[in-house]
Amino acid sequence: MSDYHINIFYSEEDGGYVADIPDLEACSAFGRTPEEALREVQQAKQAWLEAAREAGKPIPTARYRPVIYQVA
């Protein structure tokens, strides 16, 4: 299985970095640095997947790719 794409961006409003996983609805995290946001979202991903499995919900396949990686 390929892993999920993670976006990391600086949020002026929050004063730190936000990391999110587009394929996992509402799976995001915050950190003071990009590295911290990445660590936090990786933990959030594990919790998201565990909760979905326990609830019997389907696990989405890794599909999201930024436009720069899409082939015409």
Image (tube, rainbow, N blue to C red):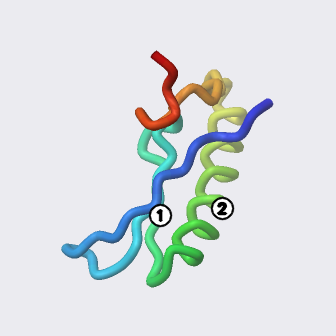
User: Which image quadrant: the C terminus?
Assistant: top left
**Seen in the image, is 45 located left or right of residue 25?**
right
In this rendered view, identify the residue nearer to me: 51 or 24: 24
**CB of mark 2 within 8 Å of CB of mark 1?**
yes
Q: Amino acid at mark 2?
A: Gln
User: Which image quadrant: the N terminus?
Assistant: top right
Q: Which mark is residue 7?
A: none
Q: Give the residue pinned by disc 2.
A: 43
| Whole-number angstrom distance, CA of label 2 to CA of label 1 | 9 Å
| Callout 2 secondary element | helix
Which residue appears at 42% of the width and 45% of the height? 26
Q: Residues within 10 Å of mark 1 (few under 14, many from 20)?
A: many
Which residue appears at 45% of the width and 37% of the height? 68
Q: Number of callouts in the render?
A: 2
| Callout 1 secondary element | strand
**In the image, is residue 32 above or below residue 4?**
below
Which residue appears at 58% of the width and 75% of the height? 35
Which residue appears at 65% of the width and 59% of the height? 42
Q: Position of residue 31 (x, y in %)?
A: 47, 77
Q: Position of residue 51 (x, y in %)?
A: 64, 42
Q: Position of residue 4 (x, y in %)?
A: 63, 40
Q: Amino acid at mark 1?
A: Ala
**In the image, is residue 38 above or below residue 4?**
below
Residue positioned most to the top: 72
Compare marks 2 and 1 and give the one earlier in the sequence: 1
**Seen in the image, is 13 located left or right of residue 10?**
left
Among the 4 quarters of the image, the one containing residue 50: top right
Residue positioned most to the left: 13
Q: Position of residue 49 (x, y in %)?
A: 67, 41
Q: Which mark is residue 29?
A: 1
